[in-house]
Amino acid sequence: MIRPSRIFQRPESGSHSGPESARRPVAGPASGEGPRRLRILVTGASAGLGAAIARELAARGHGLALTARRGDRLDDLAREVRALGGEPLVVPDDLADPEAPARIVAAAVGRFGGLDVLINNAGVGLPRYYAESDPEALRLQVAVNFTAPILLTRHALPHLVESRGTVINIGSAIGAVANPILGVYGATKAGLAYWNDALRREVGHRGVRVCLVDLGPVATEFFDAVRRRAGCDRVNPLGIDPPPDRLYNAMRDRPPAAMEASPAEAARRIARLVDRPRRRISPLRRVVWPVRVVGAILGLIPPLGDLAVGAMIRRVEREEAAGGEALRSRAVDRAAR
């Protein structure tokens, strides 16, 4: 179980480590204390895209509250952030806990004296056909991907109104085309996009900007986590690189490398929203826009999508059955020796 909000702040050499320095706020955009230095909360910051976003923003000297489950990784990232010129605060917590958003926002505001930007980046996807899914895995995806951003933003909103700040929600292009192996993940991202637009229309006149990042595939630890946490009892686990002797199948395999952006590339695009908010961006366009076009076509002709996806799923099932038979034959051969 993750302990609530352990604040990590190692003082620099020669600095004071007492309670007063621990509560020293970062200069906000209206403080008049030199360059524009923002107070930013990044979720899912321990690795992958979240860590890349933190590094990108640290180089600009911002104060960064970093949250994720893995406190040891956050500690390592905090050292990088400080070396790059940022001011880190580590808040290990588990966004699957409904009480975590309140703790995390309170820790960030308590340390920095306010909040200028919230980046809802944390997400978990467990590729698995719905009928095979563990109910707890379904609950986890909804809690982290959908419920947590809504609650974090609600707790942060008074501070963002005060600073005329920005909310950046990391969505996914997967919402354009329903994919059964990521059905619940895609549903959470589609819901996030709907809520993002509703929130933008509600708070825009109060000076709060709300941005959606319609993200394509990014080469992060997402698929390593898939390998560890989902489908490992299958002959051909879902969501990983396809076997070299088989054709790519979108109902089973990780996207090809040519379709993936690097975390640094995506992070640069996202970091620009801090200074120049936009309603929606789509890294990478070469991937996201074709997916949208396919989604639009399948929306106009639903039977076409049903036929195509159904054929791919049947192919997965045939390969799984053949692979299982081969494993059983080898087991029989070994037992007979």
Image (spheres, helix red, strand yellow):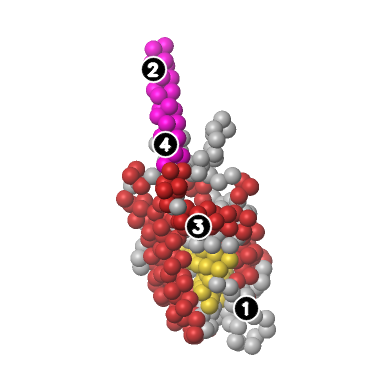
Q: Residue at x 55, y 35 (%)?
A: 247
The percent position of residue 173, horizontal first and vertical second, equals 52, 58
Between circles 3 and 2, the one closer to the viewer is: 3
The boundaries of the magenta stretch are 310-337
Dominant SS type (magenta):
helix
Amino acid type, label 4: Arg
Residue at the outermost left position:
135
Between circles 2 and 4, the one closer to the viewer is: 4
Residue 210, compared with residue 182, is above or below; it is below
Amino acid type, label 1: Arg
Residue at image mark 2: 332
Residue at image mark 1: 37
Disc 2 to disc 4, C-alpha distance: 27 Å
Element at badge 4?
helix
Element at badge 1?
loop
Amino acid type, label 3: Ala
Q: Nearer the viewer, residue 91 or 225?
A: 225
Amino acid type, label 2: Val
First along the sequence among labels 2 and 1: 1
> The C terminus is located in which quarter?
top left
Residue at image mark 3: 296
